[in-house]
Amino acid sequence: MGQGAAMSHTNEPGDVLAAIAMGGLTAGTLDIGAAVLISGRDPVFILQFIASGLLGKASFEGGAGSAAYGMILQWAMSLVIAAIFTAAALRAHRLRRHWIAAGLAYGLGIFLVMNYLVVPFSAVGRFPNFSPKTFALNLAAMGAFGLIVSAAARNRLGR
């Protein structure tokens, strides 16, 4: 099968769902690892921090249960983020043709929305306090998140 044939997709519901699942679950899971590396905290703390967006400070006393809840929330948010990009990529083919630029731009958008809208209005209720280093690392992590989502959309939906 030639390259042109491999890129012809019909955008069946299965392709769309696969793009969302592949992009969202992969990016969301790797994002936890990035948060662990950037913060120097253990994965349980990171997941409890995510859960604290809804549970508040009680999340840090919830043990494995609140960590599991944090993972579910992380995946749910990641799937929504991937679904938004995938829906846009279905309509705007240039997002798939220029997937690297689109993914990096989307990652920047994710960074801004999560840090300056979602977290401040969550039960955590605070704006981020980045050092220049952690700002750059978090921005790079969200750029990678956007690239993963964009690559999954391009892979499953074609150019």
Image (cartoon, rainbow, N blue to C red):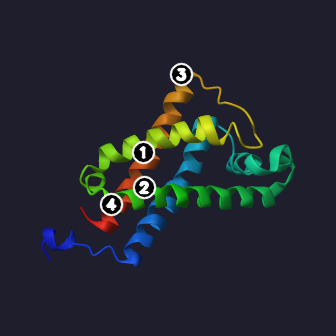
Give the amino acid type for the residue marked by disc 4 in the picture. Arg
Provide the residue designation for mark 3. 132
Give the amino acid type for the residue marked by disc 3 in the picture. Pro
Tell us which disc is closer to us: 1 or 3: 1
Is residue 106 depicted above or below 26 in this figure?
above
Q: Residue at x 52, y 39 (%)?
A: 111
Q: What crowding class fits label 1: few (fewer than 14 Cα within 10 Å), some (14-19), or many (20 or more)?
A: many
Q: Which mark is residue 85?
A: 2
Closer to the chain start, of discs 3 and 2, is 2
Provide the residue designation for mark 1. 106
Give the amino acid type for the residue marked by disc 1 in the picture. Tyr
Q: Secondary structure at mark 1?
A: helix
Q: Are marks 1 and 2 in contact (CB under 8 Å)?
A: yes
Closer to the chain start, of discs 1 and 2, is 2
Q: Secondary structure at mark 3?
A: helix
Please give left or right for residue 34 compared with residue 44 in the image: left
Q: Which mark is residue 13?
A: none
Give the amino acid type for the residue marked by disc 2 in the picture. Phe
Percent across and percent down for residue 13 are: 40, 77
Tell us which disc is closer to us: 3 or 2: 2
Q: Which mark is residue 91?
A: 4
Q: Secondary structure at mark 2?
A: helix
